[in-house]
Amino acid sequence: MEALARLAAETVDTVAKTAADEKNIAAAASAGFAYGLAAIGPGIGIGYLVGQAVSAMARQPEAAGMVRTTMFLGIAFTEALALIGFVVFILLKFA
């Protein structure tokens, strides 16, 4: 009888561990998906920004220095969005 009680207790512990593991797996998957979505926007934004900057420099080569400076500022601000998404990913993963 004691063996059955011990087996039942081990089964409950295994089910509880499995549920906790499944929760961790689901949290990691959803956090990774969220970071993937957070990286898409800045990627598109930076591509568009650089394309427009190159186009502007080709049309007015004398303004290339000012356009390049503005482009790098825009890239920095857009990349900050991806970094914020990464921080949220870390918070979701380890919180």
Image (cartoon, grey):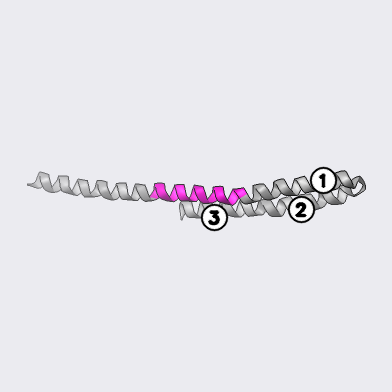
Picture residue at 76% right of the left edge, 46% below the top: 50
Q: Compare residues 82 and 12 and report the one nearer the observer.
A: 82
In the image, which is nearer the foreground, mark 2 or mark 1? 1
Looking at numbered disc 1 in the image, what kind of residue is underneath it? Ser
The answer to whether 30 appears left or right of 43 in the picture is left
Q: What element carries label 1?
A: helix
Picture residue at 9% right of the left edge, 47% below the top: 2
Q: Distance between the residues labelled 2 and 3?
A: 23 Å
Q: Compare residues 24 and 62 and report the one nearer the observer.
A: 62
Badge 1 is on which residue? 55
Q: Distance between the residues labelled 1 and 3?
A: 35 Å
Label drawn at residue 88: 3
Label drawn at residue 93: none
Q: Compare residues 30 and 93 and report the one nearer the observer.
A: 30
Number of on-image labels = 3
Residue 51 lies, in percent from the top left, at 76, 45
Residue 45 lies, in percent from the top left, at 69, 50
Nearest to N terminus: mark 1 or mark 3: 1
Badge 2 is on which residue? 73
Say if mark 2 contacts mark 1, CB within 8 Å: no
Looking at numbered disc 3 in the image, what kind of residue is underneath it? Val
Q: How crowded is mark 2: few (under 14 residues within 10 Å), some or many (20 or more)?
A: few
Q: Give the range drawn in magenta.
A: 24-40
The answer to whether 53 appears left or right of 10 in the picture is right
Q: What element carries label 2?
A: helix
The answer to whether 44 appears left or right of 3 in the picture is right
